[in-house]
Amino acid sequence: MRDFAYARASRAAEAVQLVARSADAAFVAGGTDLLNLMKDGAEDHDLVVDINHLPLAGIEESEGRLRIGALARMADVALHPVVRKRLPVLSQALLAGASPQIRHMASIGGNLLQRTRCWYFRGEDFACNKREPGTGCAALEGRSRWHAVLGGSDHCIAVHPSDLAVALRALDATVHTLGPDGTRTIAMADFHREPGHTPHLENALRHGELITAVEVPLPAPGTRQRYLKLRDRATFEFAVVSVAAVLRMNGRTVEEARLAFGGIATRPWRSPEAETALRGKPLTERNIAAAGRLLVQDARPREDNKYKVELVQRALRDMLGRFTGGSR
């Protein structure tokens, strides 16, 4: 880690101005990812701006929506009474992420911006287009057990790591920001980018733009929600496969289905085809299986990660089967 300057901002506009002024500046909140990236040499910054004293940690319900400040800690959001009652998929995703110590430090905004755990990106001795654009992607011909089967390109197949982002994708959340040019609202569907030819550009934020809040529409009472995370060990581990489901049902018939997936793609993944396969139909094993096949129809697995194609379909079947007691 090279030397860097430190500044503490007391106002959001001040923080934005400080970071926007330097191409190598960054915001820091909990620091649970940023500091590791700097230690690993995956990121270098000449200035780090501490935003922890900004008034952005509130959680407020208003007009059928929940606004979560970007500096709210993962643990506080997971245990908030409105989140537990109305957004259990979000609470479950947050509690499935990291360790209790990290959940008490990590911020909501920072969690959305965490970077991949791809060992080629985190190590200094490998070609990585995320770390150094134009150098290649060692994962394409290397060990790819944890890598993406959907949303990848010939330049990158790294998986996005956030459990929170998967749940927010299923909930149709929006991200609010403040940047040098003013405020913006970005749909979660547009927030994270697929790698394409520019895998180092991972999200829709502009330099100096600060996440100020995440807003989640509260589903109607009775909406069924669940987050399922499959991982190599029970705690402090990233998803091999994860599924977030938000379903509105009329008896056994699915009126609305929102399904988001983690561990299998380069960004939090939604499959309109899989959702359409369930909508207006009874939630039977046959219909769930059809949705799963549509989910992975465009998968591009490699030898080490081809197991994910079947595993994610099994995870979807297990999750949705529990909503109906495993009906056929």
Image (spheres, rainbow, N blue to C red):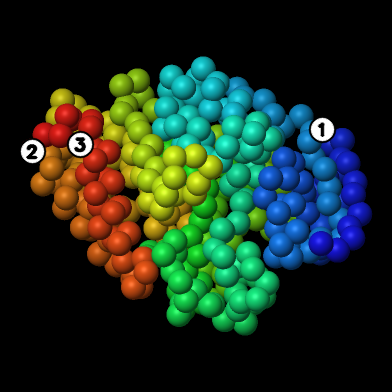
Q: Residue at x 78, y 54 (%)?
A: 26
Q: Residue at x 36, y 66 (%)?
A: 305
- The amino acid type, in three-letter code, at marker 2 is Arg
Q: Mark 1 sits on what residue?
A: 53
The local crowd at label 2, few if under 14, some if 14 to 19, many if 20 or more residues have their Cα within 10 Å, is few
Q: Residue at x 75, y 59 (%)?
A: 39
Q: Answer with left or right where residue 64 lies relative to residue 297.
A: right
Percent across and percent down for residue 168 are 48, 40
Q: Secondary structure at mark 2?
A: loop
Query: Between 210 and 185, which is closer to the camera in this rendering?
Result: 210
- The amino acid type, in three-letter code, at marker 3 is Gly
- Say the numbered circle drawn on residue 7: none
Q: Is residue 152 above or below residue 109?
A: below
Percent across and percent down for residue 77 are 57, 28
Q: In terms of sequence position, does the residue under pointer 1 or pointer 2 come before the other?
A: 1
Query: Between 287 and 149, which is closer to the camera in this rendering?
Result: 149
Q: Residue at x 76, y 29 (%)?
A: 55
The furthest residue to the left: 328
Cα separation between marks 3 and 1: 45 Å
Q: Mark 2 sits on what residue?
A: 328
Cα separation between marks 3 and 2: 9 Å
Q: Quadrant of the N terminus?
A: bottom right
Query: Between 290 and 317, which is closer to the camera in this rendering?
Result: 317
Q: In terms of sequence position, does the residue under pointer 3 or pointer 2 come before the other?
A: 3
